Amino acid sequence: MKMNLQSVNFNADQKLIDFTQKKLDKLDTYFDKIIHADVYFKVQNTSGKENKITEILLSVPGGDIMVKKTCNKFEACVDECVSSLQRQLIKRKEKMSAHA
């Protein structure tokens, strides 16, 4: 799957990019018609520990799916986003097969 990644207020290292790509590639097993993913990593300037925001916009037929999570590590955010996307993709696939 093609992935566009943007990091705001910092530079993402290659390990984080590879980790994100690997996690997103697993979504193909649940829904094979994914066009591409736009991933945004942001760091908030707050005093709290949970200041890292991850947004993933998944382009699929029938409309895009957007998830946004805030955690203390980007890896944890990606895990939460992917599991949420996984559930939504399964629902989308069930709806599409019910209409067919």
Image (spheres, rainbow, N blue to C red):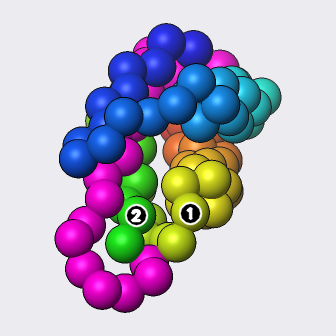
Q: Is residue 14 left or right of residue 63?
A: right
Quarter of the view holding residue 6: top left
Residue 19 vs 42, above or below: the answer is above
Quarter of the view holding residue 60: top left
Label 2 – label 1 distance at C-alpha: 6 Å
Residue at x 58%, y 44% (from the top left corner):
89
| Quarter of the figure with the C terminus | top right
Mark carried by residue 52 = 2
Q: Position of residue 22 (x, y in %)?
A: 71, 28
Quarter of the view holding residue 30: top right
Q: Which residue is mark 1?
A: 73
Instruction: Label 2: state its secondary structure.
Output: strand
Label 2 crowd bin: few (<14), some (14–19), many (20+), radius 10 Å: many
Residue 98 vs 80, above or below: the answer is above
Name which residue type carries label 2. Lys
Magenta-tinted stretch: 31-50
Name which residue type carries label 1. Lys
Residue at x 57%, y 14% (from the top left corner):
1
**Closer to the camera, 99 or 36?**
36
